[in-house]
Amino acid sequence: MTDKSDGMNYAPVSRAAIKPSCKPGEFGFSVIGLDHGHIYAMCNGLLEAGASLLRVYDRDEAKVALFQQRYPQALAASDEEAILADPACLLVASAIKPCERAALGLRALARGKHYFVDKPGMLTMDELSQARAACGVAGLKYAIYFGERHHVEGAVFAGQLIEQGAIGRVLHLTILAPHRLNKDKRPDWFFEPAENGGIITDIGSHQVEQFLAYSGAKSLRVLHSSLANYANPDKPRFFDYGDASLVADNGASCYFRVDWFTPDGLGAWGDGRVFIIGTEGTIEIRKYIDVAHSPDGDHVYLVDKRGEHKYELSGKVGYVFFGRFIRDCLDGTETAIGQEHSFEAMRATIEAQAKAYIIRG
């Protein structure tokens, strides 16, 4: 599950010491929907932070059996209702296929459960409006797993540097996010925008969320976006390339590129990089690999008024999101990620996908 060559099943395990954020049995969660391998990463993070995994349900019994091999403590539920009716379950975690995520979230919130779902958390503006309204009524969390920030120690550390003022005011981000397609392993729904959301809604949501987080912005405007299908003519509704330019309410700007063109020879599923320009310095994050130099990820380069600095962070920072998220659910706080922050990330992402110029080439 920690094989970096396969992004869709990449499930990091923390090498840093993690102090549980809750008492044993205090925070029970169950899983509904195993369509994407990110559910393993989500469960790893919650369990490492002290949560208790109770039950699992999926329509595919083979997926449930495989999940139980990894997490034998999870009891197989007979149906979704067995989980939604369980008073010990405080949170439903899900990686059901994207077109079903919002509806499941609404059902979970209506039954008094917090909801933690793989990105993209929803596919349409209507689904976003319904989720926002449901959260307002229920007073519960609708959290989205943005693993490219939550589950990358270099990304966590970069955020800490920015919070400490290491590069001054953030002015611009350039985010490069290539991914490996592994085309023969993908389900049919992956290639259908109506079911998967499309490349910007899918993996672009990571990049939009990072821009919001690192810039400290509250809202975004999409200046330009584009899509292309360069190499998959057998999948006519699929786009293998996307990009977008954004500007934040505080004046910061961002360009990001997402694609499915990771070369076979790369030792990771993608050479994800983030470049951040501030008024007093710059940061580069090399998330998963340092090409032709180190197979390890989590390299951060900082240049400030004092000089040039390199940090190798694997196993040194940990994944702070999960413990904070558990406490937020229990305490009604927002220390891990703001609810409106998550919704705005998805709103801007869905807009960028919908208004994109289609490149014919």
Image: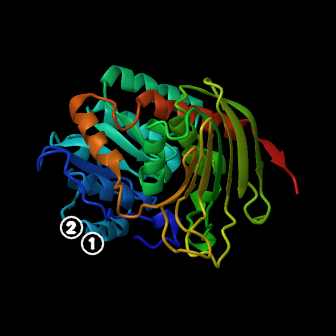
Give 28 or 4, whichever is nearer the viewer.
Answer: 4
- The residue at the far front in this view is 306
Residue in the image at 78% along x and 66% along y: 231
Residue annotated with mark 1: 69
Determine whether label 2 and label 1 are within 8 Å by CB.
Answer: yes
Residue 64: tell me if it is visible.
yes
Image-quadrant location for residue 348: top right
On screen, residue 51 versus residue 134, left or right, reads left
Give 205 or 302, whichever is nearer the viewer.
Answer: 302
Give 167 or 136, whichever is nearer the viewer.
Answer: 167
Residue annotated with mark 2: 72
Classify 341 as above or below 150: above
* Residue 209 place in picture, x, y as percent: 53, 40
- SS at mark 2? loop
On screen, residue 109 versus residue 78, left or right, reads right
On screen, residue 231 versus residue 87, left or right, reads right
- SS at mark 1? helix
Residue in the image at 57% along x and 32% along y: 169
Task: Mark 1: give few (<14), some (14-19) or many (20+) Cα within 10 Å.
Answer: few
> What is the total number of numbered labels drawn onto the structure image?
2
* Residue 121 place in picture, x, y as percent: 48, 41
Residue 239: tell me if it is visible.
no
Residue in the image at 24% along x and 51% along y: 49
Amino acid type for the residue under numbered disc 1: Gln
Q: Quadrant of the C terminus?
A: bottom right
* Residue 255 place in picture, x, y as percent: 70, 43
* Residue 147 place in picture, x, y as percent: 46, 52
Classify 46 as above or below 73: above
